[in-house]
Amino acid sequence: MEPPSRKNKRRSVINPVQYTRESETAGDVFDGVVFNISESGFFMITPEALQEGQKITIREGLHPCPREAIVKWSRKYKDIYYKVGAEFI
């Protein structure tokens, strides 16, 4: 069975990012690394747990303006990290 097609083609990157979570106190900033990105979303690895449906704001060097996204899925990875898929809104 083939995986479902994506809205937009993703490109591979290794891009450190910072993000904030909607439910957090203002000023709390978290780190992650984006490994692929498209016009509609991205995949990153982060040491912080994120919840499906959680709204985050991501800031990264290739796109100077902050962008909001919704976490579509999050899975534990290697005991200390999380794999996260998110869609830009």
Image: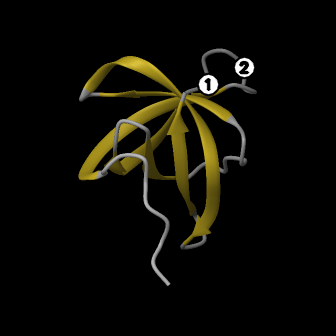
Please tell me in which quadrant of the rendered image residue 80 appears: bottom right
Q: Using the image, determine if residue 40 lies above or below residue 52.
A: above
Please tell me in which quadrant of the rendered image residue 2 appears: bottom left
Q: Could you tell me residue 88's position as x and y percent?
A: 50, 33
Q: Could you tell me residue 6's position as x and y percent?
A: 43, 54
Say what amino acid the circle numbered 1 marks: Asp
Residue drawn at x 72%, y 41% as measured from the top left: 53
Residue drawn at x 50%, y 84% as measured from the top left: 1
The disc at residue 65 is none
Q: Could you tell me residue 79's position as x and y percent?
A: 60, 71
Q: Could you tell me residue 75's position as x and y percent?
A: 63, 64
Q: Residues within 10 Å of mark 2 (few under 14, many from 20)?
A: few
The disc at residue 25 is 2
Residue drawn at x 54%, y 44% as measured from the top left: 86
* Residue lying furthest bottom: 1
Q: Is residue 19 left or right of residue 70?
A: left
Q: Using the image, determine if residue 88 lies above or below residue 72.
A: above
Front-lying residue, 55 or 15: 55
Q: Which residue is mark 1?
A: 28
Residue drawn at x 49%, y 66% as measured from the top left: 4
* Residue contact between numbered discs 2 and 1, judged by CB atoms under 8 Å: yes
Q: Find the distance from the CA under tag 2 to the CA under tag 1.
A: 6 Å
Front-lying residue, 75 or 18: 75
